[in-house]
């Protein structure tokens, strides 16, 4: 039996063979409505030759060992005695019919009556994406499930590479490109969160695909915990990609097991097309409403004072931050328990009376009087052994008591309902004690092992607090960008992309993260003159414009600013405020300049009538004159007025008589995309900002 789904320019074709689980034969660009599916099935048949099994095992939605599958299996089961179990399924496919009569979803079912195992794979085509999730249930006896992949779809034989991401603290979203080769590529995040090292995103490109054209596929696992990715090329040349929770995520028999949902996107407009799909999905999915409101300019006090909370100094800092243009003040770590450093008090979510004898309300009220909202830092999932909470409940620790510490701290077992109840109550008391509109939720310690139960408990804790306090916006921070995934965006309206406030490093991190993240949810702050994580000293203009590429904020001591620095920061902040409305919903498109020293992007409004280009120079170029920067996403027949926003920053070594340095240029979209914009010469560690407006004649 053959089945078909169509939606938003995509087609999925599924087949139920006489035995075993059903298979996805095709997913990708829309097929003709009169496509002969039987001929399509016949066209996928492979030949058999020497050195092969007499029957080629089908690529089912959960590749089955019992059917002779030669690659990585879709599930690994053991009984309570530790013996492996290899289900033998008989299957069927059921189609979901939408109100308009068309099919929008289907379910592939497999039953192994002997073992009492039922497998279900659910697919939905919606909002330009394919959403897939797998479920296992056991009727006779529970099994230990050490691996279960989300439903698998074939990758085209014309795909040439898998792109995934690695990283580290202050160096997130580092892109890696892997050519398909015989065997399996394994990436696994075993540290309990979606991770700096292995964030749960991947791309598959086809031959000839570029940033603006060619078929490209995007994948993201909807999961905030440990996970596993396998990309495999079989000996017969077939390609597949698997995602699921980390191995060992389930360490005891269960009656029901499911994978996190897997989001899959397909674009014929290259990697920028995939980026737009991800950005739109995150921006528009149900969840926190804050990301769809005008984004306020942040001020965070961490890199100004660290743990030194002095109310009078903080009032002075707040006044200066407001004068610079800040619209929200976030009080970071150090306000609770006896928290004078990172060795103590995590878990004791009571306001420190030494530092705040009257509580936080007087300071929050003062911040409000300056025209700023008030936000507060928490790290709910963590505990110090030097805390009242640990002394009262050492049994609440996740893992053994003698495990190594991480940042002087340990992890609470939030899979326990009593632990979550304590945290919700104590945190809620603080949130009710002052006009708090924002919570920065940190996660600075790796888990002792991957645990699906811990990930589910953490998400439940987030959900409980956001449901109880719907008026408060929550930010996901995990030593910077250590917990950025699609599940987080159902409860958090903002992520702290990196603890690095070094503008040069931020250029690269922000560019690569924009493959998935819209600017509205991506926090970016103007750091201190001397960066605390790199030691690099950068000009205020560069620091400010790099922060203005995303959700802008300040994170430095404003008392250090010179008058000139303060003036530049005010001007850039005002530009950001003046443009945030039309930029809401703008796509971030990567630009390729032909100069490896330049990192450039274009943010284009939803209606295509306005755009802004940020072109940063990280280092000295190999050639003497800047190469033209081609733009993208424009109407070739339209004309655009191009203005260099910060042309006054052209250095004296930029001596040419370029019109862009004295006024706007009016050029066609065709010219701007084929030739590009000739920018002035600039020093390393600087950035040019261009504005474009479509002229309707």
Image: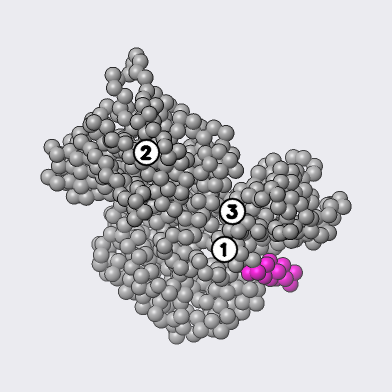
* Residue that label 3 marks: 588
Q: How many labels does the image show?
A: 3
* Residue that label 2 marks: 13
* Residue in view at x 56 percent, y 43 percent: 269
User: In the rendering, which numbered label is found on residue 584?
Assistant: 1
Asked whether disc 1 touches disc 3, contact meaning CB atoms under 8 Å apart, the reply is no
> Could you give the CA–CA distance between mark 2 and mark 3, rounded to whole angstroms?
32 Å
Asked whether disc 2 touches disc 1, contact meaning CB atoms under 8 Å apart, the reply is no
Depth order, front residue of 289/329: 289
Q: In which quarter of the image is residue 570?
A: bottom right
In the rendered view of the protein, which quadrant contains the N terminus? top left
> Could you give the CA–CA distance between mark 2 and mark 1, rounded to whole angstroms?
36 Å
User: In the rendering, which numbered label is found on residue 118?
Assistant: none
SS at mark 3? Answer: strand
Q: Quadrant of residue 327?
A: bottom right
Question: Which residue is at the far top?
Answer: 50
Q: Judge whether residue 374 is colored magenta.
A: no
Rendered location of residue 56, percent (x, y): 31, 24
Q: Earlier in the sequence, mark 2 or mark 1?
A: 2
Which residues fall within the magenta stretch? 559-578
Rendered location of residue 199, percent (x, y): 45, 48
Residue 447 located left or right of residue 368 = left
* Residue in view at x 47 percent, y 72 percent: 438
Q: Is residue 254 above or below residue 612?
A: above
Q: Can residue 278 be seen in this view?
A: yes
Q: In which quarter of the image is residue 433?
A: bottom left
Q: Earlier in the sequence, mark 2 or mark 3?
A: 2
Depth order, front residue of 362/432: 432
């Amino acid at each position: 039996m053959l089945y078909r789904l169509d939606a938003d320019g995509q087609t999925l074709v599924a087949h139920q063979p006489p035995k075993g689980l059903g298979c996805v034969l095709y997913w990708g660009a829309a097929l003709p409505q009169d496509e002969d599916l039987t001929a399509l099935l016949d066209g996928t048949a492979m030949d058999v030759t020497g050195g092969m099994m007499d029957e080629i095992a089908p690529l089912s939605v959960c590749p089955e060992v019992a059917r002779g599958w030669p690659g990585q299996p879709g599930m690994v089961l053991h009984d309570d005695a530790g013996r492996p179990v290899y289900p033998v399924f008989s299957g069927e496919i059921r189609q979901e019919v939408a109100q308009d009569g068309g099919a929008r979803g289907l379910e592939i079912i497999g039953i192994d009556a002997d073992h009492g195992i039922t497998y279900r794979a659910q697919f939905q085509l919606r909002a330009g994406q394919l959403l897939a999730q797998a479920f296992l249930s056991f009727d006779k006896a529970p099994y230990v499930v050490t691996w279960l992949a989300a439903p698998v779809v074939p990758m085209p034989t014309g795909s040439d590479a898998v792109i995934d991401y690695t990283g580290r603290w202050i160096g997130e979203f580092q892109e890696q490109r892997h050519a398909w080769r015989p065997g399996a590529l394994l990436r696994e995040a075993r540290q309990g969160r979606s991770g700096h090292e292995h964030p749960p995103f991947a791309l598959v490109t086809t031959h000839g695909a570029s940033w603006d054209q060619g078929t490209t596929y995007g994948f993201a696992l909807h999961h905030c915990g440990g996970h596993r990715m396998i990309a495999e090329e079989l000996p017969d040349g077939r390609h597949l990609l698997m995602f699921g929770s980390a191995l060992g995520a389930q360490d005891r028999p269960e009656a029901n097991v499911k994978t996190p949902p897997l989001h899959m996107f397909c674009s014929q407009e290259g990697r920028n097309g995939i980026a737009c799909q991800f950005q739109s999905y995150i921006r528009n999915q149900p969840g926190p409403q804050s990301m769809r409101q005008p984004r306020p300019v942040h001020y965070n006090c961490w890199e100004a004072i660290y743990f030194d909370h002095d109310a009078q100094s903080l009032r002075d800092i707040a006044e200066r931050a407001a004068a610079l243009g800040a619209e929200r003040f976030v009080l970071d770590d150090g306000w609770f328990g006896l928290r004078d450093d990172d060795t103590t008090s995590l878990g004791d979510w009571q306001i420190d009376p030494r530092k705040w004898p009257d509580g936080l309300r007087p300071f929050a009220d003062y911040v409000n009087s300056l025209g700023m909202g008030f936000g507060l830092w928490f790290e709910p999932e963590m505990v110090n052994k030097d805390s009242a909470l640990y002394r009262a409940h050492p049994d609440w620790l996740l893992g053994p008591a003698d495990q190594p510490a991480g940042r002087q701290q340990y992890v609470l077992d939030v899979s326990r309902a009593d632990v979550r109840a304590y945290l919700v109550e104590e945190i809620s008391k603080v949130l009710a004690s002052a006009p708090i509109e924002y919570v920065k939720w940190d996660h600075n310690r790796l888990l002792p092992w991957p645990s699906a139960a811990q990930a589910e408990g953490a998400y439940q804790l987030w959900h409980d607090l956001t449901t109880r306090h719907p008026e408060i916006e929550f930010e996901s921070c995990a030593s910077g960008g250590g917990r950025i995934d699609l599940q987080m965006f159902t409860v958090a309206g903002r992520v702290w992309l990196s603890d690095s406030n070094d503008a040069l490093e931020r250029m690269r991190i922000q560019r690569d993260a924009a493959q998935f993240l819209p600017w509205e949810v991506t926090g970016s702050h103007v750091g201190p003159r001397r960066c605390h994580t790199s030691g690099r000293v950068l000009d205020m203009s560069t620091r400010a414009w790099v922060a203005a590429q995303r959700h802008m904020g300040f994170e430095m001591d404003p008392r250090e600013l010179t008058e000139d620095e303060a003036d530049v920061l005010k001007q850039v902040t005002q530009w950001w405020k003046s443009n945030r409305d039309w930029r809401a919903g703008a796509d971030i498109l990567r630009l390729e300049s032909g100069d490896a020293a330049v990192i450039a992007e274009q943010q284009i409004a939803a209606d295509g009538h306005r755009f802004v280009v940020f072109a940063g120079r990280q280092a000295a170029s190999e050639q003497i004159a800047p190469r033209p920067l081609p733009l993208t996403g424009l109407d070739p027949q339209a004309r655009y007025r191009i203005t260099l926003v910060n042309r006054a920053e052209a250095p004296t070594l930029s001596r040419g008589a370029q019109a862009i340095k004295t006024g706007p240029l009016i050029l066609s979209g065709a010219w701007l995309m084929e030739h590009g914009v000739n920018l002035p010469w600039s020093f390393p560690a600087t950035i040019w900002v261009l504005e474009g407006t479509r002229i309707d004649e």
